Amino acid sequence: MELTNNKQSYITIGPINQIIMTISVPLMINNLVRTLYNLTDGLFVAQISAEDFAATAFVWPLNFLFIAIGMGIGVGATAIIAQFLGAKRKNYAQHYANNTLVLTFLVGLAACLIGIISAPTMLRWMQATGTLFDKSLAYLRINYIGLFFDFLYFGYQAILNAQGKTKTITTISFISSLTNVLLDPFFIFERLPLLGLPGLNMGIQGAAWATVISKFLLYVLAFRISQKESEFPVSMRQNRFDLQVVQHITKVATPTAVGYGGSALGFTVLNGLIAGYGTDTLAAYSMVNRITDIITQPQMGIGGALTSIIGQNMGAQAYDRVRAFFKRAVAIVLSISFVASLLVLLFQEPLLSIFIKQDASVELWMQAKEYLAYTAFIIFFMGLFSIFNGYFQGCGKTKYGMFMEIGRLWLLRLPVIWVLGEMTSLGSTGIWIAMLVSNAGVCLFGYYIYKTRDWTQTTV
């Protein structure tokens, strides 16, 4: 069910279960589509070589380091616009939406240029050498071109998400991802698999160019659809730039951006540490993470939906409903995580065989199976992490999400990996233990914050 003009109060007065599913299911599908979007490059590139696959995974944190800024702006704008809509102040919501578009345009252009220029330095800092450096640099620089379109899309996504129009976002994401799937083999291979038709034979660079084209299409679709479906007109060209509004958006967005950015930087360091354990460990880590990304999308969708749901109810001062939404979301996420955990434990080899060839090294198979076993328990905490984060963002208290994002990696995961690596003979097992401990620890922190803070104040 989409939110329409005659149902603007749906989120603030409708039935809780129905609202959670109405808003979150499209986000689940959208997140899954976006995950498959990123997964496609890896699946096709893995057919070239394990090193090419490792390169796509190796540079992910560097790309996400910049994307984190755009996501932070999007989350901050979503929370503010949703609260204005919940408070029935649509003129303010429109003004903030238009200034969000200006902000994402300017910051996106800067991020694109900085990323392209700094890519070699960042890869050397991550200790990439030889052919891994060459392949990672080629793939990363092209992907940084797509950063500009990512930022533009985040602006329109925030505006639509704040209105609960998650179905629209899912539709255009599906179209963009399908485009990427179709373009990948044409750009990557000399001959298209199964069809035998000639391709461009660009290898890993072809995968990057296919992604950039798909991101451009995603932005164009978001722009066109927002003009038709938004509850209020949105336009960057006819907007009155308001420095105070931009500062307000930035104030709310900065903690989230810093949190995502700090997390991305942490993953950059983490990838560097894991690379020191050998190619098999890096590949096992990357492959299992791809599986985890897929099976946790329902939980992530519910957490993402909470931002607009909590935001609108906070704006309407419906604090009892805010608490009810949180508790119901926790119950749903734990139930989904239980099912996902069983699937992981029961179907280890079929899941891993999606990425690992049967003739791959025994060491790679052993490490991947061990990490996947730990993942069966990590799943629960990842779901709860998403719920806490969505709740804090919807309340406009994005600093707590920042603390969780940064603390999970810098205060827990990286130190635990270092300690276990230096003081024990666990080897790569120490990495998997650190993943479990860090996710569990940060959820305990999130629960403490939830229980000890006043949640009756909004950001508008």
Image (cartoon, rainbow, N blue to C red):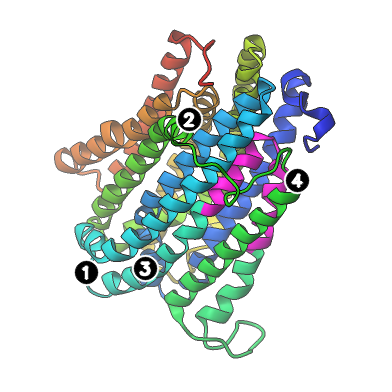
Task: Examine the structure image and report whether residue 165 is included in the region drawn in magenta.
Answer: yes
Mark 2 in CB contact with mark 1 (< 8 angstroms): no
Mark 2 or 1 closer to N-term?
A: 1
Mark 4 vs mark 1: in front: 4
Mark 3 in CB contact with mark 4 (< 8 angstroms): no
Q: Which residue is disc 3 drawn over?
A: 141
Crowd tier of the residue under label 4, counting other residues whose Cα lies within 10 Å: few below 14, some 14–19, many 20 or above = some
Q: Position of residue 455 (x, y in %)?
A: 52, 12
> In the rendering, which numbered label is found on residue 129?
1
Magenta residues span 152-177
Q: Which residue is disc 2 drawn over?
A: 385
Q: Position of residue 251 (x, y in %)?
A: 41, 30
Q: What's the amino acid at mark 2?
A: Phe
Q: What's the amino acid at mark 3?
A: Arg
The N terminus lies in which quarter of the figure?
A: top right
The C terminus lies in which quarter of the figure?
A: top right
Mark 3 or 4 closer to N-term?
A: 3
